[in-house]
Image (tube, rainbow, N blue to C red):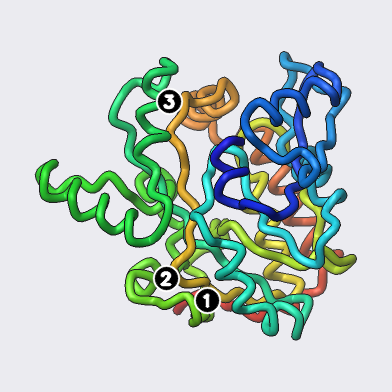
């Protein structure tokens, strides 16, 4: 949160936390991190159970429900935004205001880990490596390629394990895309596309399906429904999100293990299948973004 507060600067944050702690304790932690707590609305999941599946979509809905601005940058806690993102978004306020179904895609990268993520020292190392802006990101990319035998420290997020998750984002174009320009996402390579979006908080915005808890399908299904309801996606220039390396969650490890043994029996797959059936019947298809041919 220290990085979030520093980079988002003097702008409001809606934060959802699953914890057994009280609200005052959370605000005290945020204050010690240097955050301006007057700008942060904290919502707690008071039914949080550390032994149950992590209620990721419940927390996302909780955070979105407390947004007080017209639009929100949807971001998970293990991503860090680039400095100046607000100012870059402000350049495109006319497009966001023109149609409530105009959404902005923020390209997502990941930092290749350089140490074991189990230690605090490693976390500190990775935090120090995080680029603040596009210039720093490109410098780290080029420097690491030169010194690591062609292996970049900066990658498309999940590009190795889930290529279609962000493959429709125009990364190559982003390299030369100025802050003043928006690029349309004209098609998607797969229904697995799950970018991080800037969206208007309105009644037409689908909620996250809270049946998805733990790992898998929780954001993919949301973006599928967003697309199906007629949203158009535009990619922002200069700005980005970057994933901070961390240990794999217990839910992620269990999902990977079960997927190898019996993928069709995964509970998350059964929930996803039911979601697809529900959406086909109940959500008219007004998609503006087709599949790439």
Say which of marks 2 and 3 sits in front: 3
Query: Dot 3, crowdedness within 10 Å: few (<14), some or many (≥20)?
Result: some
Query: Dot 1, crowdedness within 10 Å: few (<14), some or many (≥20)?
Result: some
Residue 176 found in image quarter: bottom left
Image x and y of residue 199, in percent: 72, 65
Say which of marks 1 and 3 sits in front: 3
Residue contact at pointers 2 and 3, CB within 8 angstroms: no
Q: Secondary structure at mark 1?
A: loop
Label 2 to label 1: alpha-carbon separation: 8 Å
Residue 78 found in image quarter: top right
Label 2 to label 3: alpha-carbon separation: 29 Å
Q: Secondary structure at mark 2?
A: loop
Residue contact at pointers 2 and 1, CB within 8 angstroms: yes
Q: Nearer the viewer, residue 31 or 139?
A: 31
Residue 278 found in image quarter: bottom right
Tell me which label, 2 or 3, sits earlier in the chain.
3
Image x and y of residue 40, in percent: 77, 43
Is residue 211 at least partly visible in the picture? Answer: no
Q: Quadrant of the N terminus?
A: top right
Q: Is residue 47 above or below residue 215?
A: above
Q: Nearer the viewer, residue 5 or 195?
A: 5
| Residue with the mark numbered 1 | 185
Q: Residue at x 47, y 43 (%)?
A: 243
| Residue with the mark numbered 3 | 123
């Amino acid at each position: 949160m220290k990085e979030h507060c520093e980079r988002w600067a003097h702008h409001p944050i809606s934060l959802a936390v699953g914890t057994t702690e009280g609200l005052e304790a959370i605000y005290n932690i945020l204050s010690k991190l240097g955050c301006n707590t007057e700008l942060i609305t904290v919502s707690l999941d008071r039914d949080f159970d550390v032994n149950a599946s992590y209620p990721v979509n419940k927390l996302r809905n909780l955070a979105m429900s407390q947004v007080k601005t017209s639009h929100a940058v949807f971001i998970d806690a293990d991503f860090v935004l680039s400095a100046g993102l607000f100012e870059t978004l402000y350049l495109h306020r006319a497009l966001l205001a023109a149609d409530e179904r105009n959404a902005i895609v923020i390209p997502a990268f990941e930092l290749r880990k350089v140490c074991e993520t189990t230690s605090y020292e490693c976390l500190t190392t990775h935090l120090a490596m995080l680029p603040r802006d596009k210039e720093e990101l490109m410098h780290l990319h080029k420097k690491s390629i030169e010194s690591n035998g062609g292996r970049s420290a900066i990658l498309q997020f999940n590009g190795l394990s889930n290529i279609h998750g962000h493959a429709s984002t125009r990364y190559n174009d982003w390299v030369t895309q100025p802050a003043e320009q928006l690029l349309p996402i004209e098609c998607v390579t797969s229904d697995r596309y799950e970018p991080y979006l800037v969206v208007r908080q309105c009644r037409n915005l689908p909620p996250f399906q809270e049946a998805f808890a733990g790992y898998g399908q929780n954001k993919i299904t949301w973006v599928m429904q967003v697309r199906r309801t007629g949203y158009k996606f535009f990619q922002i220039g200069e700005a980005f999100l970057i994933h901070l390396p961390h240990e794999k969650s217990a839910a992620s490890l269990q999902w990977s293990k079960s997927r190898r043994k019996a993928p069709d029996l995964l509970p998350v797959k059964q929930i996803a299948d039911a979601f697809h059936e529900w959406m086909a019947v109940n959500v008219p298809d007004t998609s503006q973004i087709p599949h790439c041919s």
